Amino acid sequence: MSSETKVYAVGSSEPDDIIIPDINAEPKLHTKYEEYSFHRYGDVTFQKSTSKNMDKLWAHFYKHENYPEYYLGIAKRVAICKCPTSGKEELFNGNRCLSIENPKIYSAVTVTVKIKTRVYTRDFIFLGWAKTPFHEWIMRKGTNLMIEQKFIDGLLPEDKRYLKMNC
């Protein structure tokens, strides 16, 4: 709880605009950053959501310090590939990234990804095509973000607007 002392000019009964806090009062606790209703990241502004899916996205964006810059739309063909060294599965836009148009399952494919001005090439094992649609964004750091349609269906219209989706 905070108390304030109003300051009056000499000979005046009206308070001035200056308010001096009472030094004996309890210190005012600051609102945590996560509790603000608006979040700003450069020229991108997001509003706190009631959607659990948007909260998960916020946690991902904040953890990686990477925010959506441009919405590319729905990827027509999403390839599921596995890294031969780490065993981690990754998703890639098949029309833009794969070296061959129709790879066979468990065949080696070369994936080419452009991040900002640099082009990276890496070999993966092709596992198949995703059966559900995926939405794709270019992030601030130049990487791509792909999110499944059923995850997007859990977002509110305001959340979609903040993700730069014209829905």
Image (spheres, rainbow, N blue to C red):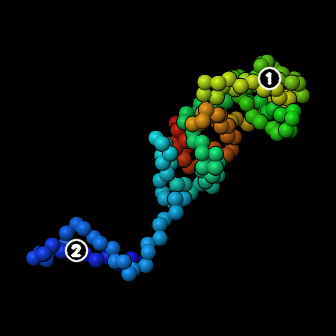
**Most distant residue in the top direction:** 100
Quarter placement of the C terminus: top right
Decide which of 163, 140 is in the foreground and name it.
140
Q: Amino acid at mark 1?
A: Thr
Decide which of 25, 32 is in the foreground and name it.
25
Q: Amino acid at mark 2?
A: Val
- Residue 108 in sight: yes
Which residue bears the numbered disc 2? 7
Which residue sits at x=89%, y=28%?
A: 106
Crowd rating for badge 2 (residues with CA inside 10 Å; few <14, some 14–19, many 20+)? some
Decide which of 129, 31 is in the foreground and name it.
31
Question: Mark 1: which secondary structure?
Answer: strand
The total of numbered circles placed on residues is 2
- Residue 165 in sight: no
Is 107 situated above or below 51?
above
Which residue bears the numbered disc 1? 110
Spatial separation of the CA atoms under disc 2 and disc 1:
72 Å
Q: Earlier in the sequence, mark 2 or mark 1?
A: 2
Residue 63: give x, y in percent of width and height.
64, 49
Is 119 situated above or below 158?
above
Which residue sits at x=10%, y=76%?
A: 11
Crowd rating for badge 1 (residues with CA inside 10 Å; few <14, some 14–19, many 20+)? some
Which residue sits at x=54%, y=54%?
A: 49
Q: Quick check: 13 left or right of 61?
A: left
Residue 110: give x, y in percent of width and height.
79, 23
Question: Mark 2: which secondary structure?
Answer: strand
Residue 141 is drawn in which quadrant? Answer: top right
Single out the mark in the foreground, 2 or 1.
Answer: 2
**Most distant residue in the left direction:** 11
Which residue sits at x=81%, y=32%?
A: 81
Q: Quick check: 69 left or right of 6?
A: right
